[in-house]
Amino acid sequence: MPRAASGLTRVERLLPDLARAAGAGLTLVRREAGDGRGATGGVWTEPVPGAAGLWLEIRDAAAMTAERAASLAEVVGALVEAEAETAQVATELSGRYEEIDLIYTISEILGHTIRLDEAARRILHEVATVVGARRASLYVLDEDRKVLRPQAAKGGEPGVMDPIELDDDCSVAARAFREMKIVSYDPSDPTNENPGCPTGRNYKGRAFLSVPVLYASPGGQSRPIGVINLTDRTGPDTFSAGDRKLVAAIANQIGAALENARLVQRDLRQQRMRRELELAHDLQLKLLPAPSVLQGKADVAVRCRPADSVGGDFYNLLRLHGERVGVMIGDVSSHGFGAALIMALAMAGSGIHAELAETPAEVLAQLEESLSDELSRTEMFLSLFYGVIDPAAGTLSYANAGHPHAFLVDIETGAAQRLEATRPPLGLGGTRGTERAVPWRRGRDLLCLFTDGIADAVSEGGERFGEERVLSHVRRLVNRPAQQILDAISTDVAAFTGGGAPSDDRTLLLLKS
């Protein structure tokens, strides 16, 4: 009888062990189908279950029974089946070696490459090579502009490729992104309709794959973050089902990498923004003069705390001709960067106009004129108080552009006189206004100026801090140095509001002479 096929050699090598255990000689043979089961000439033949045409010959069959022979054949059948499965797996692994190696290679790239653009270029090249595509591209979602931007390309340069609008009906990539499904075209199949537009990007005559890159956060649903496109095959003009599965697996692999890169870039932007905000905060505070500017002329204390990193509150202290002193406080109608810009321009212009203009009203009018373009463009306005103290004449001349919190406090009696507005806030138009003059008595009067952020500070119960609390501290401590009065008010505001971040810029200025 003919011997068994050579593919069963490994099973045959196990037969001696099985024969010793069974106490009989065992051989595998091939024979035609038929009822040859049983003992013939001292040899028992038994078909191997699950292996068509394969029989087990059992020598020394005198003591062999049908039940025992069937058991031996069943054991051999299990061995043959296991061997066949092993061979099949080995064949599949051998046939998909390039794909397995590709997945490993991409894992290595993602594990050792920090720059996403470099990783994307290498991954795209590897994928295109394995599936046999001359042209390939990777598009990544730009969340801010809602477009797909080219991240890497093979057979083209990302820099010269246009972004793809997400709602572009003629873009296969946009469709794959929107539907979160693979879109493919096989020109070799006449029933396969080209999903592109009749004109323009229809890729007629070329097979292509457009595979969405998906990402799912832990416990979340998958969402699209990019698309891989492949076309212009090097071999037959078709992508197989295996190609589609492979590229989908790769897309899932790089989805997490793309999302991680996006989070890293966002974190870097946030860090850079925080550094820039800190720098802007420091620069803005440096624009504000120190109280020592008026050393020897007045006892001054001032504190300015922006609600954001930068704000719209400001003040200025000016040494004018003779013994005169200029004091200014302003409050832009908003806070943040826009208000900070107006504040910086007002600070720059106030010193110049204070030197050149003859009266406080002229200073405000000229300052408004110099800020008109910025105030109009930003649709902001600012309340502003500017006063000039002339000790020789014993007067405080001032112009008030709608700034409500300006008071002259009598040190002896504690009486507080509101220094009323003389014109509308800068930026609202209307009259240029005039200035007013009130007596200024050295050692007898205190100038108290603050912004809405202090008066409108709110407690946890919703109560407003108000002007009267500020003035009560001034009256109670009026004979103390200006800094001690300011510290008491600031401490009270912080305790009143619970110490949280202010919702509006807070500025307080006290001056005695």
Image (cartoon, rainbow, N blue to C red):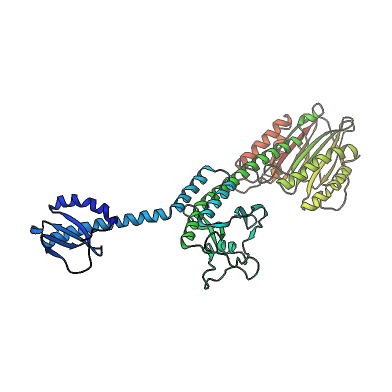
Q: Is 277 placed left or right of 323 in the picture?
A: left
Front one among 437 and 38: 38
Residue 125 seen by the camera: yes
Farthest residue toward the front? Answer: 1
Quarter holding the N terminus is: bottom left
Farthest residue toward the top? Answer: 296
Front one among 242 and 212: 242
Q: Is 2 placed left or right of 121 in the picture?
A: left
Residue 300, image x, y percentages: 76, 32
Front one among 383 and 266: 266
Residue 379, image x, y percentages: 77, 53
Farthest residue toward the bottom? Answer: 191
Q: Hey, which quadrant is residue 77 in on the image?
A: bottom left
Q: Hey, which quadrant is residue 313 in on the image?
A: top right
Quarter holding the C terminus is: top right
Residue 460 seen by the camera: no
**391, above or below 170, in the image:** above
Residue 9, image x, y percentages: 27, 53
Farthest residue toward the left? Answer: 62
Residue 37, image x, y percentages: 15, 65
User: What residue is rendered at 83% in x and 50% in y?
Assistant: 373
Mark count:
0
